Amino acid sequence: MDFEDKLQRAIQRGQERTSARANAQKKVEASKEDIRNRQNEFRLNLSDHIEACLKKLAQHFPGFDYETIYGAKGWGGAVSRNDIDRGPDGRAGSFFSRVELTVRPPNEFNVVNIAGKGTIRDKEIFNWNYFEDVLEADQDDFKAKIDKWVLEFAEQFATR
């Protein structure tokens, strides 16, 4: 093998490495795009589910006002109300109740994260987070968790 053949092979190997790196970079970018698209799909579907559940809750307990949540905190909703009641000592008091559910913004860990916080008559009853890897997550699992949290709030609110 003469020098010319060796030179041609060296050039070919270099071009193959460049091509391989470009293909690897395209896969990483496609993967990032897949993650971003999947995050958006979860955010849209789960925030719609949160809104539907909380509005149904508000229909069963008059006085609750629905509020849309979006931005740095995440996307979702909340229902809240203030009650005026007389305590055991006969003095009037104001009591605050609220349930808030959000889909958290994307982060460096590539997880879908929902957060829920419930307060009944000025007492926090839960402050929960649930998350899964975005590529392995199942929307039905998240919807079931949202349903469970809303039902838990409704049951506890009804008993007070």
Image: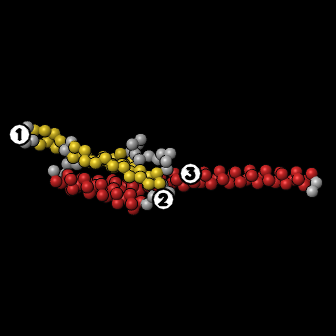
Task: Work out whether 120 lies above or below 59.
Answer: above
Say left or right for 31 vs 107.
right
Q: Earlier in the sequence, mark 3 or mark 2?
A: 3
Q: Amino acid at mark 3?
A: Lys
Q: Is residue 43 visible?
A: no
Check disc 3 and report the residue beneath it: 32
Q: Is residue 104 visible?
A: yes
Q: Secondary structure at mark 1?
A: loop
Given the current orientation, which residue lies at the most extreme left position?
90
Q: Nearer the viewer, residue 102 or 1?
A: 1
The number of callouts visible is: 3
Check disc 2 and report the residue beneath it: 136
Name which residue lies at 25% across and 55% down.
Answer: 152
Q: Give the label on residue 90, or none.
A: 1
On the image, the x and y values in percent for residue 111 come to 46, 51
- Judge depth for marks 2 and 1 and give the one in front: 2
Name which residue lies at 49% across and 50% down.
Answer: 110
Name which residue lies at 62% across and 54% down.
Answer: 27
Here the colouring is: secondary structure
Cα distance between the residues tagged 3 and 1: 60 Å
Q: Amino acid at mark 2?
A: Glu
On the image, the x and y values in percent for residue 15 come to 78, 52
Q: Earlier in the sequence, mark 3 or mark 1?
A: 3
Q: Nearer the viewer, residue 11 or 72?
A: 11
Say left or right for 94 vs 148.
left
Cα distance between the residues tagged 3 and 2: 15 Å
- The quadrant of the image that shows the N terminus is bottom right
Q: Amino acid at mark 1?
A: Gly
On the image, the x and y values in percent for residue 26 come to 64, 53
